Amino acid sequence: MLRLAKREPSALLLGAQLLGVLVYPFMEGSVGRALFSVFGIAVLGLVLLAVRRSPAWTGFGLVLAVPATVLLMVQVVTGDEALLPWSSALEAILYFYAAGALIAYMVEDHVITRDEMWAVGATFTLVAWAFAYSYQVCQAIEPGSFTAANDPEGQRSWMELLFLSFTTLTSTGLSDVVPVKAFARSLSMIQQLAGLAYVAVLVSRLVALTVIRARV
């Protein structure tokens, strides 16, 4: 894994994120999801080590990752759901930070490597996870921020919020989960804008550089 993290860290991250999409439905309990979140943070650490541009990148990532991991482990041991908003907030910041690190990694030069192509997908999943954690914090602060056809009054599960995040980021509009409170809708609108900007600016730039390299 260390060799893969050095050679193609973005592929490792994308694979871990997609594995999470498939595994999370079987780990809906707080303990199972917390354990898998710890694994996700470990993978993020490998990626930050591999793509860091300066020691500050990795140092700040550790500042975020260590308390998030501690809170998740305490949550596993105690089963205290009150810690969930705090760990989710740290994870949201960490995932946004990691997405920024990968974007900086992709745009720093005009040479497109295979790992940078993997980074396109990895960054997209990072942003989706970051907003899902943000939705979880929003729901904890203001219960009833999101509704769903199958359970209009209940709190939304992690998979429901992750599904909402992916559908909002891709602008497909397929989610049955709907933000109904004002701040939840604000977060959703920001995510829609982020999804459009990601495709319009970053992906189009990488495609253009790839075409130029092919012609040369």
Image (tube, rainbow, N blue to C red):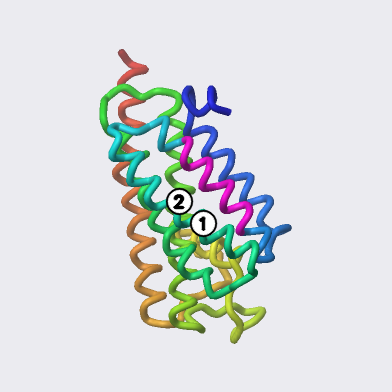
Residues shaded magenta: 34-46
Q: Nearer the viewer, residue 41 or 129?
A: 41
| Observer able to see residue 159 | yes
Q: Is residue 87 magenta?
A: no
Q: Quadrant of residue 101?
A: top left
- The extreme top residue here reads 216
Q: Which residue is mark 2?
A: 66
Crowd band around label 2 with a 10 angstrom C-alpha radius: few (<14), some (14–19), many (20+): few
Query: What amino acid type should be assigned to the residue bearing mark 1?
Result: Val
**What SS does tag 2 mark?**
helix
Q: Are marks 2 and 1 in contact (CB under 8 Å)?
A: yes
Q: Quadrant of the C terminus?
A: top left
Give the residue pinned by disc 1: 70
Question: Which residue is at 51% across, 78% downward?
Answer: 146
Quadrant in the rendering for residue 191: bottom left
Q: Position of residue 7 (x, y in %)?
A: 48, 22
Disc 2 residue type?
A: Val
